[in-house]
Image (cartoon, rainbow, N blue to C red):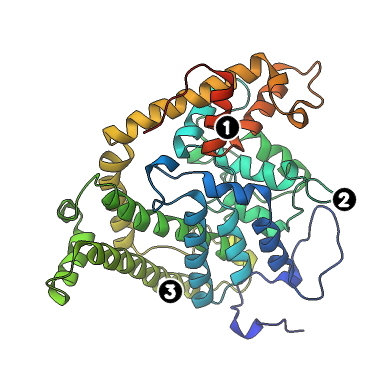
Amino acid sequence: MREPGDRFRSAFACRPSQTRGRMVTEPGSPTRSDFQRDRDRIIHSTAFRRLKHKTQVFVFHEGDHFRTRLTHTIEVAQIARALARSLGLDEDLAEALALAHDLGHTPFGHTGEDALQACMQGHGGFDHNAQALRIVTRLERRYPNFDGLNLTWETLEGLVKHNGPLLDGEGRPTTKYLAHGVPGAILEFNARNDLWLGSHASAEAQAAALADDIAYDAHDIDDGLRAHLFDLADLAEVPFLAGILDEIAALYPALERSRTVNELVRRVITRFVEDVITESATLLAASGAASADDVRHAGRALVAFSPAMVEADRSIKAFLFPRMYRHPRVMRIRHDAAAVVDDLFRRFMAEPALMPDEWGEGLAGADADRLARRVCDYIAGMTDRYALDEHARLFDATPLLR
């Protein structure tokens, strides 16, 4: 039987009627597919709303026009849907994965993640993908019959594996997790609900992962220019960007700076999206994939950049790393933000009663690992503003992060 929208789906797309189901069985919806329900549950979650006040690179004091985790997530979702639509994938699943991909991030961007990872050494560590899984399977408490959001297997799989397999063919951690191993939260959940950690994720998850890369490259250029961490002339160091700027100058010789920046960002996104669609269509056709599982077991990502765009992506990130992510102004804020996270962690470990009552439940007699994970969950869920407010409540001096 054909599903609504099937005429737009490729053979290798995920189909909600063929989902491997949810951890807790629920009756179906008469108006929404299972993947649409996943998307809606993510949007209505507390963790999703908190993304509004969690920053990417800059903290919220910098200004109202810099990206937050929420605006970044919305941009990723738009690009993911565009890729899914063009490749004949399930748009709702791709969108759900895009909307969920940053749920596990801490306050203060990657600085907060690095600080929590340092605090959690010896207690299982911290990983934002594992934290996202904890949020959607345990920490959200909205429904009477289960903890978490009770998402489908396909959404959970994509959330954990959107950047590729976590284990190799012999069951060893892949490159990202080689040093510290696959996070315990993922392994614990996988023991109860096998997510096929040794395979790639669905084409929809792969599309969401590339959408994240595209959005990052484009909006970090935009935010870096807006913050005057570098100027348009500096972008000539990146051949891909220099070529686009030359095109804009030839078409619009007297265009003011703000419109030039917007046109640059628009063209960067367009080039990457069009490249992914062309390259992925070729890879998928050549693979002979006739089902979603064929994509998972193809042995490589089938939704991908072309080699030329891999180089463009690499060169943009290489440009941004020293000029934006390690800019002295940003590094000063990073140092102070890391100190806030470290202070909060140590204080709550010493005095867990200082956390709200619901976070202190059941901690009587808890060992250090369990206490540390509870403190970690609490801090990871904080917005930038709330973390600073908590620090000001507990300490005599709190950095301004400016």
Residue type at tag 1: Phe
Q: Mark 3 points at which residue?
A: 282
Position of residue 24 measured from the top left corner of the image (x, y, whole percent): 84, 53
Disc with the residue nearer the chain's start (2 vs 1): 1
- The CA span between labels 2 and 3 is 45 Å
Q: For the residues carrying marks 2 and 1, which lies nearer the camera in this image?
A: 2
Q: Is residue 91 left or right of residue 154?
A: left
Q: How crowded is mark 3: few (under 14 residues within 10 Å), some or many (20 or more)?
A: few
* Residue 316, horizontal then vertical, whole percent: 29, 52
Q: Nearer the viewer, mark 3 or mark 1?
A: 1
Question: Which residue is the site of mark 1?
Answer: 126
Which one is closest to the eye, mark 2 or mark 3? 2
Residue at image coords 79%, 57%: 22
Above/below status of 232 relative to 7: above
Distance from label 3 to label 1 (Cα)? 38 Å
Quadrant of the image for the C terminus? top left
Q: Relative to the observer, which residue lies in front, 379 or 294?
A: 379
Q: Tell me, yes or no, if residue 180 can be seen here.
A: no
Does residue 114 appear left or right of residue 125 in this picture?
Answer: left
